[in-house]
Amino acid sequence: MASNSPRRKQLLAMGGWDFKVVPAQIDESPLASETPKECALRLAKGKAYSASKELGKDGIVVAADTVVVENDKQSEQIMGKPRDAREAEEMLLRLRGATHKVYTALAFLHVRDNILLTDLCESEVTMRNYSNAEIIDYIATGDPLDKAGAYAIQHCLFRPVEKLVGCYANVMGLPLCHLSRSLMSLGLQTGVDLPTVCQSKLGYSCSVYSMVLCREL
């Protein structure tokens, strides 16, 4: 796995696959000419190729890139990770009470055969109208500072999300059903009922997993 994210490690472990972490080192700055989806796909592919340099001639590299996208009437704006507490506060204020999108691009590189597959998951997230005091308390925990959009959907105290349409694991950074269907096409099966395990572990009733696994979404 081309990521050192503890959340992605937690999610990938749910599938029962054997894996090791090989963090990728790339410039994650978006390009002016690309859409958020294009940015996420480019970065996921870049991470996969970067991590593959640390492997031998065999193995499958799994890489992901998640972007939080703020909607306005003119364009979609990518919200990266906040540089400091002040920027985290600005992001949370902008997202408060509004709906935004979260895209996670996946890249799968079969090193020996040089086969690259990609996938993309999209979720729509509506934030609740949390108070200024709640924002300050949440930032004080340090949790927002390593997360795109400055929030974690799974944070047990802040609980920033009012409504979610789509994949919960996607908002955490690794859509497991999208990942599973791509790995299966590369001949790598999971020995668990992944949708059941995912919903049980995350405490979320998913309405889209069957469509994802059947490639209807």
Image: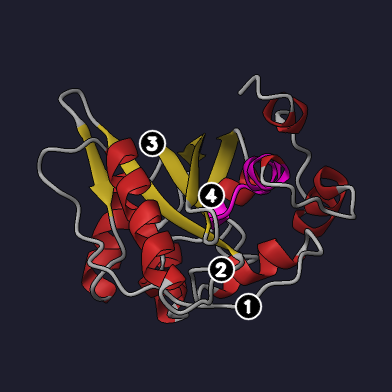
Q: Earlier in the sequence, mark 1 or mark 4?
A: 1
Q: Nearer the viewer, mark 2 or mark 3?
A: 2
Choose between 90 and 118: the one closer to the eye: 118
Q: CA distance from mark 2 to mark 4?
A: 18 Å
| Residue furthest to the left | 32
Q: Is residue 61 magenta?
A: no
Question: First in sequence: mark 1 or mark 2?
Answer: 2
Residue assigned mark 2: 1
Residues at badges 1 and 4 in contact (C-beta under 8 Å)? no
Between discs 2 and 3, the one toward the N terminus: 2
Residue type at mark 2 is Met
Q: Residues within 10 Å of mark 1 (few under 14, many from 20)?
A: few
**For residue 90, above or below residue 136:** above
In the rendered image, which residue does mark 1 sit on?
20
| C-alpha gap between disc 2 and disc 3 | 33 Å
Sequence-wise, which precedes: disc 2 or disc 4? 2
**For mark 4, what is the residue?**
171
Residue 194 horizontal/vertical position (percent) = 82, 49
Res 29 visible: yes
C-beta proximity under 8 Å, tags 1 and 2:
yes
How far separated are the C-alphas under marks 3 and 4? 16 Å
User: Dot 3 surroundings within 10 Å: few (below 14), some, or many (20 or more)?
Assistant: some
Quickly name the residue at label 3: 98
What's the CA distance linking mark 3 and mark 1?
38 Å
Three-letter code for the amino acid on which mark 1 is drawn: Lys
Point out the stretch of residues depicted in magenta: 171-184
Give yes or no for contact between labels 3 and 1 (Cβ–Cβ under 8 Å). Answer: no
Rendering coords of residue 13 (x, y %):
74, 67
